[in-house]
Amino acid sequence: KVEEIKADAAECDRLNRWAFEAMDANCGHPSGYFQGLVHDRKHADWFLSAEEALSHGLADRIGSPTLYTTVSVTFDLK
């Protein structure tokens, strides 16, 4: 069982590194940027506000889309 736990932990570590590297590259940050942020917080559960996501490059803009609609109704009363 100990060897399985070690293998699972190594796989989790590999996947975390892959995800952080992808986030770094897609957001235009140097390698290790997001991993460093999570490490500084001492845990992986990190929930961002919209403004924080924007400041770290995880979002392009904040807001709700504006929806424009046109309605046309035709009645044919006989």
Image (cartoon, rainbow, N blue to C red):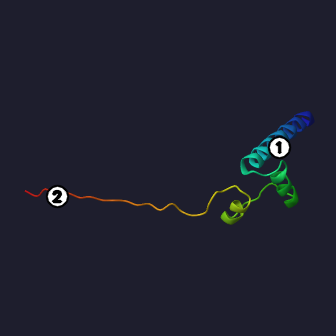
User: Residue 2 vs residue 22: left or right?
Assistant: right
User: Residue 77 vs residue 38: left or right?
Assistant: left
Residue 39: give x, y in percent of width and height. Answer: 87, 55
Residue hosting label 1: 17
Residue 48: give x, y in percent of width and height. Answer: 71, 61
Q: Quadrant of the N terminus?
A: top right
Q: Quadrant of residue 13?
A: top right
Callout 2 amino acid: Phe
Up the image or down, 66 lies above or below 17; here it is below
At 66% from the left and 57% from the top, the residue drawn is 59
Query: Which structural element holds mark 1?
Result: helix
User: Residue 73 vs residue 52: left or right?
Assistant: left
Residue hosting label 2: 75
User: Within 10 Å of the Cα at label 1, are there few (<14), some (14-19), or many (20+) other Cα atoms?
Assistant: some
* Residue lying farthest to the right in this orientation: 2
* Residue lying farthest to the left in this orientation: 78
Q: Earlier in the sequence, mark 2 or mark 1?
A: 1
Number of marks in the rendered image: 2
Callout 1 amino acid: Arg
Q: Quadrant of residue 71?
A: bottom left
Residue 34: give x, y in percent of width and height. Answer: 80, 53
- Please give the label number shown on residue 62: none
User: Within 10 Å of the Cα at label 2, are there few (<14), some (14-19), or many (20+) other Cα atoms?
Assistant: few
Q: Quadrant of the C terminus?
A: bottom left
Residue 49: give x, y in percent of width and height. Answer: 69, 64
Q: Quadrant of residue 70?
A: bottom left
- Along the line of sight, which residue is nearer the eye, 37 or 10? 37
Q: Rounded to the nearest whole Å, what is the CA distance between mark 2 and mark 1?
A: 62 Å
Query: Which structural element holds mark 2?
Result: loop
At 73% from the left and 51% from the top, the residue drawn is 27
